C-alpha cells in the first residue's frame, strides 16, 4: 500500500491470496457486502436526487449517453459519496493493480433504461499493452441487483494481458465475445477490474433498474478524467480530510 495513504489515516486492508490472484490472472474481482443496507439506501436516494435536480444536464461534465441516466462529478454532489473513493478495500485492490501512487480518475453514475445500455467492447486505457504495467482501475458500485437481464457488464477474463487492442483483434465489438463473462452480483457489491481488460455494458432487457456508481482510479502521473482541482466546489473543499485531498489530488 502507498505509505502516503496510510500516513494520512487510511486503515489498510489486506486482500486475500485468492483476491489478488483473481486481479492478476482474470483482471477482475467482485467484493460482496461492501455497501451496508443504510448506506445503500442513502446512495440510492442521492443518485435519484442528483438526477432529478440536474435533469437534462445530468452527466454533462463527462458524457451523456442516449438511453442511459448518467451522472458525473459526484465528488461535488454529496458527502454520501466520499466513502466510495476512500473505501479501504477498494484502495487496496487499486494499489495491487497499479503498484504505484494513485489518484481518483472520476466518480460517475450509470443507469441504462429498458432496451438500452449496450456498448462496444473496449478498454479504459488506450496506451501501451502487454507490458505488465497498468494505468487505470475501475470499479462498479452496485446500487441494485446486477444480472445478465438488466445489463450486467461483460468482461473477457485475462484480456488485460493481451498485447493487442480490442479494435484490432475483434471485428464486431458489439457482438458477444466467445470468452466473455457477466459480472453479476447482488446490490451492495463492488466489482473491481483492471482498466486494460476488454469489457462493456450490455442491454437492459428486463427493464429492472441497474444503477451503478463508476469509481475509477488512475496512476498519479496521468491526468484525471474529471480534473478535481478545476471542479472543486467550496462546500466540498470545506469537508475534505487530508486523506481525501490526496486521493483527489487537490
Image (cartoon, grey):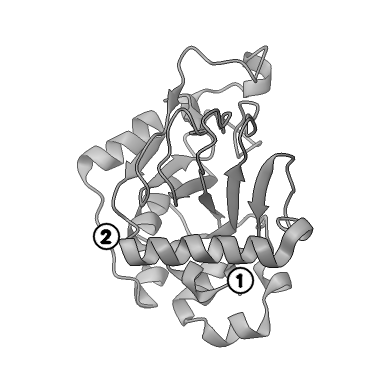
Q: How many marks?
A: 2
- C-alpha span from label 2 to label 1: 27 Å
Residue at point 32%, 35% (across, down) = 22
Depth check, front residue: 243 or 52: 52
Q: Residues within 10 Å of mark 2 (few under 14, many from 20)?
A: some
- Of callouts 2 and 1, the N-terminal one: 2
Residue at point 42%, 24% (across, down) = 181
**59 up-or-down from 164: above or below:** below
Q: Position of residue 146 (x, y in %)?
A: 43, 39
The N terminus lies in which quarter of the figure?
bottom left
Residue at point 61%, 26% (across, down) = 121
| Farthest-out residue, front | 207
Residue, disc 2: 13
**Among the 4 quarters of the image, the one containing residue 164:** top right
Q: Is residue 104 left or right of residue 56?
A: left
Q: Position of residue 21 (x, y in %)?
A: 28, 35
**Among the 4 quarters of the image, the one containing residue 250:** bottom right
Residue, disc 1: 77
Q: Mark 2, mark 1: which one is toward the viewer? A: 1
Amino acid at each position: 500500500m502507498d505509505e502516503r495513504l496510510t500516513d494520512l489515516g487510511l486503515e489498510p486492508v489486506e486482500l486475500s491470496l485468492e483476491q489478488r490472484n483473481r486481479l492478476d490472472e482474470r483482471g477482475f474481482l467482485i467484493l460482496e457486502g461492501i455497501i451496508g443496507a443504510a448506506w445503500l439506501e442513502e446512495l440510492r436516494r442521492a443518485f435519484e436526487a442528483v438526477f432529478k435536480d440536474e435533469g437534462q444536464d445530468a452527466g454533462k461534465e463527462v458524457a451523456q449517453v442516449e438511453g442511459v441516466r448518467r451522472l458525473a462529478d459526484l465528488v461535488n454532489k454529496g458527502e454520501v459519496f466520499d466513502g466510495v473513493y476512500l473505501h479501504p478495500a477498494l484502495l487496496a485492490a487499486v494499489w495491487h493493480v497499479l503498484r504505484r501512487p494513485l489518484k481518483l480518475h472520476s466518480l460517475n453514475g450509470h443507469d441504462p433504461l429498458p432496451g438500452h445500455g449496450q456498448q462496444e467492447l473496449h478498454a479504459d486505457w488506450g496506451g501501451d499493452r502487454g507490458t505488465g504495467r497498468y494505468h487505470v482501475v475501475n470499479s462498479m458500485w452496485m446500487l441494485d441487483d446486477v444480472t445478465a437481464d438488466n445489463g450486467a457488464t461483460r468482461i473477457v477474463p485475462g484480456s488485460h494481458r493481451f498485447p493487442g487492442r480490442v479494435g484490432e483483434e475483434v471485428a464486431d465489438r458489439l457482438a458477444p465475445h466467445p470468452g466473455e463473462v457477466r459480472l453479476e452480483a447482488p446490490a451492495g457489491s463492488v466489482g473491481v477490474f483492471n482498466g486494460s481488460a476488454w469489457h462493456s455494458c450490455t442491454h437492459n432487457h428486463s427493464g429492472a433498474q441497474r444503477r451503478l456508481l463508476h469509481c475509477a482510479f488512475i496512476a498519479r502521473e496521468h491526468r484525471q478524467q474529471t480534473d478535481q482541482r478545476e471542479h472543486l466546489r467550496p462546500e466540498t473543499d470545506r469537508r475534505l480530510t487530508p486523506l481525501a485531498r490526496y486521493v483527489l489530488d487537490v
